[in-house]
Image (cartoon, rainbow, N blue to C red):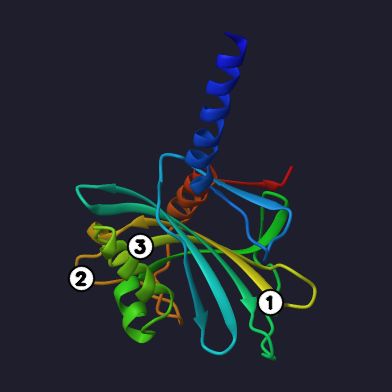
Amino acid sequence: MKLRWLLLLAMFVPCALRAAAPHRVESAVVPGVVFEVDAGLRALPAMRFPIADSTDAERWLFVDAADGVVRRMLVLQFERVQAGSDFRFVFPSVPPRQFGPHVYRSGAYAYDDVAAAARAPGLEADRTRAALAAAGLQPARYWHVARLARVTDPQGMGEAIVFYMDNADARYPHGLVDVDEDGDGRLEGVETARLWQALEQALRVRAAD
């Protein structure tokens, strides 16, 4: 009887690990760090693609949808400088925000995803919209975004970016308002605080065991 239970356990554990794996992300760009995503978000297949002749990106999407419409999305993106490229990531973590074991540059804003995809075919926004459509999902045009980014090594060879995104289409029937020099909409402090809280509920970042 004991042997039978051990065999059943051996069969169950790999299944459990496979089930959990899509919500546990590790990347060579950030060694020794685990990104644990809320299991209530649906994990889509990771995307891997070059960005110009500078970096190679891996991008992970996790979505919450209703009736085929994406209501919120968590995006993890890791970039590594391509071999032979002289490109380097050089920026300070300012304004700073502690998240897990690291300090990131932080920002929150309203964002026109359709315009971004049109400006840069084949890059992040365009590929993400295509991936969502391929999964039978309708992405928002306008998102409220909380963004974290940091350079992952002293040589500037890697970057880690986290986006938490809420569907904001209903807020902008006539397009973005109060835009900044980058074309993004400014958010009120209450909305910014809400986005950071939602990100903290959707993602945990910790040192690997």
- How far across and down, in percent of the image, does residue 80 sit? 64, 75
The residue sitting at 49% across, 48% down in the picture is 22
* Residue type marked 3: Trp
Classify 10 Å Cα crowding around label 1: few (below 14), some (14-19), many (20 and above). Answer: few
Residue labelled with disc 1: 91
C-alpha span from label 3 to label 2: 14 Å
Residue labelled with disc 2: 174
Residue 42 marker: none
Who is closer to the viewer here, 27 or 158? 27
Which of the image's four quarters has the C terminus? top right
* Residue type marked 1: Phe
Residue labelled with disc 3: 143
- How far across and down, in percent of the image, does residue 17 sit? 55, 38
Q: Earlier in the sequence, mark 3 or mark 2?
A: 3
Query: In this rendering, does residue 195 appear at all?
Result: yes
Q: Earlier in the sequence, mark 2 or mark 1?
A: 1
- How far across and down, in percent of the image, does residue 111 sit? 38, 69
* Residue type marked 2: His
The residue sitting at 39% across, 70% down in the picture is 185
C-alpha span from label 2 to label 1: 34 Å
Which of the image's four quarters has the N terminus? top right
Q: Nearer the viewer, mark 2 or mark 1?
A: 1
Q: Residue furthest top?
A: 1
C-alpha span from label 1 to label 3: 25 Å
The residue sitting at 46% across, 40% down in the picture is 39
The residue sitting at 72% across, 56% down in the picture is 102
